[in-house]
Image (cartoon, rainbow, N blue to C red):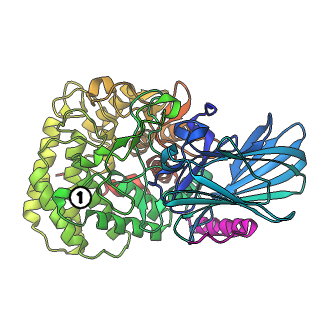
Amino acid sequence: MPAPRRRIEDYAAIGDGETMALVSSDGSIDWLCWPRFDSAACFAALLGTEDHGRWLVAPKGKARATRCYRRDTLILDTRFETDGGAVTITDFMPPRGQYSDVVRIVRGVRGRVDMHLDLTVRFDYGSSMPWVTQQRASRAGDVNVLTAIAGPDRVTLRTPAPLHGSDHHTVSDFTVAEGESLCFVLTYSQSHLEQPRPVDALAALKDTEEFWREWSARGQYQGRWRDAVHRSLITLKALIYRPTGGIVAAATTSLPELPGGQRNWDYRFCWLRDATFTLLALMDAGYMDEAGRWRDWLARALAGAPSQAQILYGIAGERRVTEWEVEWLPGFEDSRPVRIGNAAALQKQLDIYGELADALQHARLGGLAPGEASWDVQCELTEHVEKIWHDEDEGIWEVRGPPRHFTHSKVMAWVAVDRAIEAAEKFHLHAPLDRWRELRKRIHADVCQNGFNSQRGAFTQAYGSSALDASLLMIPLVGFLPCSDARVRGTIEAIGRELMVDGFIRRYIPEHANDGLPGGEGAFLACSFWYVDNLALLGRRNEAIELFERLLTCRNDVGLLAEEYDPHARRLLGNFPQAFSHVALVSSALNLDRGEPAKPAEQRASGSPAS
């Protein structure tokens, strides 16, 4: 049976610090990878049909749904109104202990509501049907225990609601009256271990609410856009893999950048390109512990030969993230292929060295204690940049066309050298400063000579190209050249004219970029926030605020963002929820809010003067 046609914005996210589930507005959990973000999904209806795994709890028949997160938490309340009454379903995942749980509490609000449950567990991205057994309650009030096992995986459902099998689904029909509550707890465990302990759902709700409110209270931002910023920070926290401090780019794979297209990627990994903005967003918002653990994750992932540095890693720092295609899943809105793993890990991207150097320097400036041998590692990276900065690469957007001399990549190579010089000068670290200063000067001159198109009056995507690229908005943000420079102003204005669609910025025009893939994509939300930051640096504050608040309107009803946005269809596109988009939102809010002393755009741009 096909799943109902849904849009990406129909989903909310709940998580426990090690994985995340997506809950649709009609009460169906359609995506959950257990036990980690990057594990195989046991609910994969998001990319297929209900027969690929889902967990529905909803009223029978027609119902009107409204939902929200409880303030400063990741606890989701969905209220369903029917002709006969109203119920609220509270969905959450307690912070991970020995086991991982999804808790769903159905509470009667008004009248009586007939409810339906459909639990379909399919391990390994919908391909493995488990063996299901049930221990039925012997008397009223006792709990029914259902267990589903396939190979190493086991899930256990505990609920007082009656359960029975129907065509390889577990179903339940029950009625909830005003004042009544019914709890459902689904727990993951490895099948060779003992059954997990029962969970007191109401106690877990109290503990989870306390956890999130205590964490949110540590946040220092209380400015004009407080609610949007705190929701983004909570989302970012939920995307942190607690055991290692790594931050996944998103909780999903293969949500399309264009419905029906091939630009479908696995984002359940950690990208180095996000390093500095993520670090600054966490530090400036007051979350120094998370920032320190992210810095430590970066250092561990990079340990080893600089020549073997990758653009992305697994959530524990794994290097092998082989890409393959799931042939049995039809994809979200028939967007194929569905990909697991990401071959971009094998690409060369020069920008990662600048991101790393910038992150390490801002960690020092922010008072984070330097990690073991961090300066030695940075020196090795700088020496490596000296050898390779003139090479072609695949660029920040991981094109699958031919390598080129991408302008942004060269700018970030300059950043790598510049931040190493700044660190050595400011913290009195031993370094070959004369040689590095000469290298910095050489890279800068090369970019200005070859990356700037005098006919267009703008920096372009690659040397010798006339195509624009939104990554060039980073030029003033990283301090390569100031916004007052005519070449930078010309670049910002050209991007605003040619890459903006209804207030949203595209990364580039695919037809002009030869990126090796057919079809187009939506506007890239992080780039749109970068444009806001550039307007702010130009002193065009009112324009920047107007655009920023327009961007806030593309969040879904619970404040979440995907990677991209289609301004014509007015819908979210790409993987979800997207860390980079939420980090960019936080950074722009800090840049615009007069009451906030920390402004990431100024922090990144305040390094050594261009030379």
Please state which of residues 191 and 292 is positioned toward the viewer in this rendering. 191
- Amino acid type of the residue tagged 1 in the rendering: Ser
Q: Residue at x 51, y 49 (%)?
A: 41
Percent of width and height locating residue 592: 49, 49
User: Which segment is the magenta one?
Assistant: 194-219
Q: Secondary structure at mark 1?
A: loop
Q: Is residue 609 visible?
A: no
Percent of width and height locating residue 351: 25, 49
The crowd level at tag 1 (other Cα within 10 Å; few <14, some 14-19, many 20+) is few
Figure check: 410 above or below 162? above
Q: Is residue 540 shown in magenta? A: no
Percent of width and height locating residue 345: 28, 49
Image side of residue 22 versus residue 114, left or right: left
Q: Is residue 277 visible?
A: yes
Image side of residue 507 versus residue 186, left or right: left
| Residue of label 1 | 608
Q: Main secondary structure of the magenta part?
A: helix
Image side of residue 176 versus residue 393, left or right: right
Figure check: 112 above or below 319? above
